[in-house]
Image (tube, helix red, strand yellow):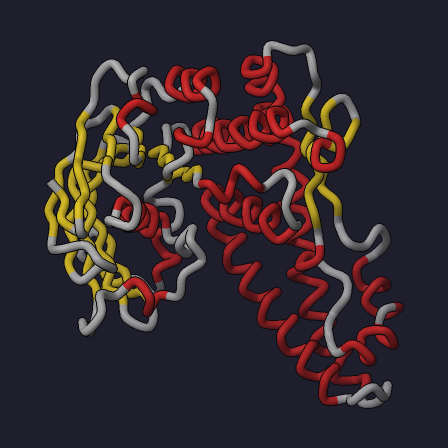
Amino acid sequence: MKVKKLCGENFRNLLPFSLEFCEGTNVIYGNNAQGKTNLIEAIWLFTGAKSFRSAKDSEMVAFGAGNARLKLDFIAGGIERQAALTINNRRYAELDTKKLKSASGLIGNFCATVFSPTDLAVVKEGPALRRRFLDLAIGQLYPNYVTVLKDYTRALTQRNAVLKAMEGKLKDSELLDVFENELVVSGEKIADYRRKYCERLTVNASEIYNELSSLREELEAVYMPSCSEDFAESLYKARRTDVYSGITSVGPHRDDLDFKINGISARTFGSQGQQRSIAISLKLAEAKNLYDILGEEPVVIFDDVMSELDKSRQSFILNHIKGKQVFITCPDPDNITGLADGKVFTVEGGKIK
């Protein structure tokens, strides 16, 4: 998987641009708030996933413009392809000049993995970050997962609406039956996807972690569903509590992921160094999983994380991205002194050169 060319206009603060990239490492350098992350965000959007910055689509359009336009020339499976995005209140996508029903139709055609400062906190912060990590990673491997996730979210929203309308009284339960049936069907599929992915993640992440830490420690990614019994039964048992709170208390939207070193939770007992090593291992393992299943190296994106890592971890990352096309943003060129070659772009005030 290689990005050849990226063009854009009216995308965030970036001035109109047309850039050609090298097949190795591409460095985007500049001070903070100049537009570095905007550029790699534009590349990431062609995976078909939402922005890794959790931004609304409308926020990606330059102030005063009607819409933003991006075009990507890339190589996948040895074939040159072209994709385009038009962004306003939502994203409209084209692939090889054919319009897609939605931007998620790009999933599986262009693949990338992104490592941002948020990912450094995935081990120790709240479960929402870990669920998002799983959803982004699984979604690129299995496009149907995104559809199932949307079905679940829709059914969850509907069940919550019914719960609030019940105003603390257990009545009209037949409506809950309808939405709970939909919730269970999609929820069980999500849990199955996540469980299997964690098994694969454990194998690759543990191997990378051992090499990174130079220690004989066993890293394990443990999927933690919010209900230990049958999902349908758990929903039924939670009805009375949920009616009073107005929200659904069990299901994949409440699941978590625990990272254990030698059987001990790294979130609670791991050092900051261990937690950061786990975060690095997870992202490199994510890239390895994409390669194992798709048979092609994904594009790898590092957004301003090098400056937050010590020299040994910087060196480890740089040594493990050989053979991949890489995009690295950084405010300090000293963070990438370990690069033998590559191409450097400078971003200042939204202008890329």
Viewport quadrant of the N terminus: top left
Q: Looking at the image, which is closer to me, 150 or 114?
A: 114
Q: Position of residue 92 (x, y in %)?
A: 28, 65
Q: Nearer the viewer, residue 331 or 54?
A: 331
Relative to 166, say whether 293 is above or below: above
Q: Residue 308, position in %: x, y?
A: 45, 31
Q: Residue at x 25, y 49 (%)?
A: 35
Question: Nearest the camera: 346 or 3?
Answer: 346
Residue closest to the eye, 160 or 273: 273
Q: Quadrant of residue 245?
A: bottom right
Q: How many marks?
A: 0
- The image quarter in which residue 156 lies: bottom right
Residue at horizontal 57 percent and vertical 59 percent from the top: 148
Q: Specify whether 145 is left or right of 112.
A: right
For residue 234, side relative to residue 97 (left or right): right
**Occupied quadrant, residue 104:** bottom left
Q: Position of residue 328 (x, y in %)?
A: 31, 33
**Quadrant into which the C terminus falls:** top left
At 43% across and 50% down in the image, what residue appears? Answer: 52
Residue at position x 33%, y 66% from top?
A: 59
32 relative to 51, above or below = above
Q: Position of residue 313 (x, y in %)?
A: 47, 20
